[in-house]
Image (spheres, rainbow, N blue to C red):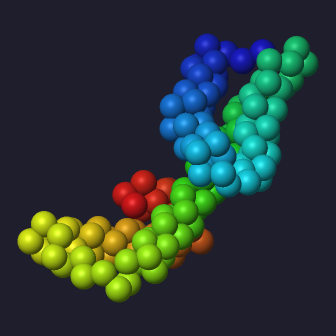
């Protein structure tokens, strides 16, 4: 059985999932219509490791917590990657739809300047996150959060 400190860690994992990742997965699945079954597999793995922490004869609760944290990091990273793909698709569709429209006339050039700045920023963060994925997952997560 888990110690009070381990129960606190389990609660932190569950809270991170419920507050940070679950709303994004829900949005991707129900609002955007993406197939998120690989993300659900990670959720199942997280909850499986957390539930094993409460088995009577479980000796290595900290190992199960470590594994659940690993799955949570992977789930978060994969969710952000799907969002990066979604944002790229939205941007491409937008640019294709309005390629013959002079967007600089909207808001006295302000709209296009803001759009271009945000678009470049988003591309920069997505590229930075992709580069960081193989080097440092924490930095990749931070870069995806900026996008």
The reply, left or right, for residue 140 in relation to residue 46 is: left
Residue farthest right in this picture: 57
The reply, left or right, for residue 128 in relation to residue 109 is: right
Q: Quadrant of residue 118?
A: bottom left
Q: Quadrant of residue 22?
A: top right
Residue at the image position 18 percent from the left and 78 percent from the top: 104
Does residue 64 appear in this view?
no
Residue in front for this viewpoint, 56 or 72 = 72
Residue farthest front in this picture: 101
Is 138 above or below relative to 23?
below
Is 46 above or below relative to 124?
above
**Residue 93 coordinates in the image, percent (x, y):** 49, 73
Viewport quadrant of the C terminus:
bottom left
**Residue 80 coordinates in the image, percent (x, y):** 54, 56
Residue at the image position 44 percent from the left and 76 percent from the top: 97
Residue at the image position 80 percent from the left and 18 percent from the top: 54
Viewport quadrant of the N terminus:
top right
Residue in front for this viewpoint, 4 or 33 = 33
């Amino acid at each position: 059985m888990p110690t009070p400190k381990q129960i606190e860690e389990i609660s932190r994992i569950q809270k991170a999932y419920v507050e940070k990742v679950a709303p994004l997965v829900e949005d991707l699945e129900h609002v955007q219509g993406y197939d998120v079954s690989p993300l659900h597999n990670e959720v199942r793995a997280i909850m499986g490791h957390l539930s094993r922490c409460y088995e009577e004869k479980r000796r290595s609760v900290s190992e199960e917590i470590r594994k659940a944290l690993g799955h949570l990091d992977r789930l978060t990273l994969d969710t952000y990657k799907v969002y990066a793909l979604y944002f790229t698709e939205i941007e491409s569709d937008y640019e294709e739809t309005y390629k013959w429209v002079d967007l600089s006339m909207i808001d006295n050039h302000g709209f296009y300047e803001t759009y271009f700045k945000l678009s470049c920023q988003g591309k920069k963060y997505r590229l930075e996150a992709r580069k960081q994925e193989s080097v440092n997952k924490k930095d990749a997560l931070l870069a995806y959060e900026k996008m």
